[in-house]
C-alpha cells in the first residue's frame, strides 16, 4: 500500500468559489422553479455553468489545490 500526500480535499479558493456560485445557482433555480419563473430557471442553469467555468479558470490560474498560489492551512 502506498502513502499519498493529502490532496486537500478541495479546500482551495477555486473550490470554495465554485461551490458557492453553484450553491447560489441551485438555490435560485429551486425557488424560481417553485414560483414558476421560467426565465430565472434558465438563468440559474447558466449560472451553474458559470460556476464550473470559474472553478476551472481559477484552478488553471494557480488557485486550485495543486496550484502555486494556494497556501494550505496547517491542521491542528
Image (tube, rainbow, N blue to C red):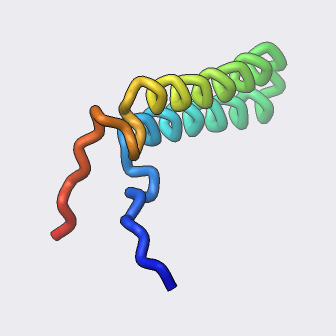
Vertical side of 6 occupied by 70: above or below:
above
Q: In the picture, residue 34 is in which quadrant? A: top right
Residue that appears at 58% across and 28% down: 51
Q: Which quadrant would residue 63 be assigned to in this image?
A: top left
Count of numbered circles in the view: 0
Furthest residue in direction bottom, as rendered: 1
Extreme residue in the front direction: 2
Q: In the picture, which quadrant includes the C terminus?
A: bottom left
Kindly identify the residue that appears in the image at 44 percent across and 58 percent down. 9
Q: Is residue 26 left or right of residue 8?
A: right
Q: Residue 50: name its quadrant.
A: top right
Percent from the top left, x then y, of residue 24? 56, 33
Image side of residue 37 versus residue 65, left or right: right
Q: Is residue 12 above or below residue 29?
A: below
Q: Position of residue 59 (x, y in %)?
A: 46, 32
Residue 23 spot, x, y in % from top left: 57, 39
Residue extending furthest toward the top: 39
Taking the image as shown, residue 3 lies to the left or right of residue 28, namely left
Q: Nearer the viewer, residue 68 or 46?
A: 68
Out of 28 and 52, give the one closest to the viewer. Answer: 52
Q: Residue at x 74, y 25 (%)?
A: 45
Residue 43 in percent (x, y) is at 72, 17
Q: Nearer the viewer, residue 49 or 60?
A: 60
Q: Residue at x 39, y 44 (%)?
A: 66
Amino acid at each position: 500500500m502506498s502513502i499519498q500526500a493529502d490532496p486537500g480535499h478541495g479546500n482551495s479558493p477555486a473550490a470554495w468559489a465554485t461551490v458557492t456560485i453553484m450553491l447560489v445557482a441551485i438555490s435560485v433555480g429551486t425557488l424560481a422553479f417553485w414560483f414558476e419563473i421560467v426565465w430565472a430557471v434558465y438563468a440559474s442553469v447558466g449560472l451553474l455553468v458559470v460556476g464550473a467555468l470559474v472553478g476551472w479558470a481559477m484552478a488553471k490560474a494557480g488557485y486550485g489545490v495543486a496550484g502555486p498560489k494556494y497556501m494550505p492551512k496547517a491542521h491542528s
